[in-house]
Amino acid sequence: MDFPSIHTWIPSGGRPLVIAGPCSAESEAQVMQTAYALKEIPQVKVFRAGIWKPRTRPGSFEGVGAAGLSWMMRVKKETGLLTTVEVAKPDHVEQALAHGIDILWIGARTVVNPFSVQELAESLAGVDIPVMIKNPVNPDLSLWIGAIERFYKNGIRNIAAIHRGFYQFEKTQFRNPPQWEIPIELKRRMPGLPLLCDPSHIGGNRNMIQSISQQALDLEADGLMIESHPDPDKAWSDAAQQITPQVLKEILENLVLRETTGNREFERSLEELRNEIDLIDYEMLRLLARRMEVAEEMGRYKYTHNITILQLQRWKELFADRIKKGSKAGLDTKFLASLLQLVHEQSIQIQTNVMSGDGRKG
């Protein structure tokens, strides 16, 4: 798939492109006050506002509905900013298009449902409008890619992905932990796909927007979608993660834009370090392969002597010992624990195959 640069459909004039506006359109006065303030920030090219709000439980504020689309038309006419809204049903698409909305975005709750995504994609067949697709709530890269593919197959070419973090049952400092490895893998699999970051939803806390935005740009994000409200504490939804236009301006002014490439000396030194990493990786793979060979030998030995595969006490001792040694070597214990668990699971699987007869004769 070939994706045009985001700068071909949003003339940003540079990096980062910024999309900003309130979580929810609450009133015409609130929308226009926010839009006029954001118009004064050079990086902001697109005004966002939630018109239809998917809520977890009924009774919460679910958006002003189609009435807010006329406010978005006024924003575009009076400020020159492009406009974008979230759509979750073909009816939303029809109404947004009728009101001249420039860009549509598909929310995280919608992306988890391929049926809904397919309906939305088909409703846009033959329509020339950019679509931004947020990652699904759960950390499923295939769902995210599948949603992008559905719109692409229905003729949408101006597509961008929005990274807004992922739901995690375990409580962390983030509202939706970023799990940066997932958007990085998305970019690897879909080269050229524009990727924006939504630090408001990742952090869930306005005090985290600066640091998350910086990290996103350091990972070569093309832009940011940040929620902005003239009086965040009185916002009707997601008050804690919204910032005033003035604070947004300060955050953007303090972001450091790093070069994606350097001079010849830099590139030479970087290449040497990359080569060293390659050699380390090759050696690591060789050692992992040897470890699995030993695990297979252990499986045959256990089978011969009628011993169970899992030796729980041995595993507990090994795990504690490796964590202790790895920690002393400066390795992150959470990373090391995940790595050890993966290696152990593969070793168990190999021994299970031996016990079941798949590899006894080896």
Image (spheres, helix red, strand yellow):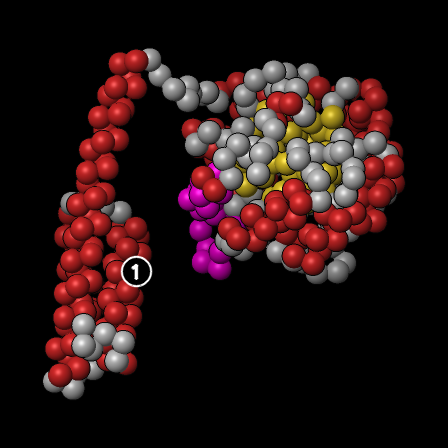
Give the prevailing secondary structure in the magenta stretch.
loop
Q: Could you tell me which quadrant the N terminus lies in?
A: top right
Is 333 in front, or is 298? Answer: 298
Q: Residues within 10 Å of mark 1 (few under 14, many from 20)?
A: few
| Residue 137 among magenta residues | no
Residue 78, x across and y down, in percent: 82, 20
Write down the quadrant of residue 278 in the picture. top left
Residue 219 image offset from top left, x and y in percent: 43, 32
Q: Residue at x 83, y 31 (%)?
A: 100
> Toward the viewer: 20 or 296?
296
Q: Quadrant of residue 303?
A: bottom left
The residue under label 1 is 342
Q: Quadrant of the C terminus?
A: bottom left
Furthest toward the front, the residue is 361
Q: How many marks?
A: 1
Q: Position of residue 217 (x, y in %)?
A: 47, 28
Residue at the spot 24% in from the left edge and 66% down from the top edge: 347
In the image, residue 112 above or below residue 256? below
Residue 45 shown left or right of residue 347 in the figure: right
Q: Amino acid at mark 1?
A: Leu
Q: Is residue 349 visible?
A: yes
Q: With respect to residue 125, does 318 lie above or below?
A: below
Label 1 secondary element: helix
The residue shown at (75%, 60%) is 58
Depth order, front residue of 119/84:
119
Whether residue 184 appears in magenta in the rendering, the answer is yes
Could you tell me if residue 34 is visible in this image? no
Look at 76% across and 31% down and name the residue there. 102
Residue 245 placement (x, y as % from top left): 65, 25
Q: Is residue 114 left or right of residue 327?
A: right
Identify the image quadrant of residue 338.
Answer: bottom left
The magenta stretch is 166-187
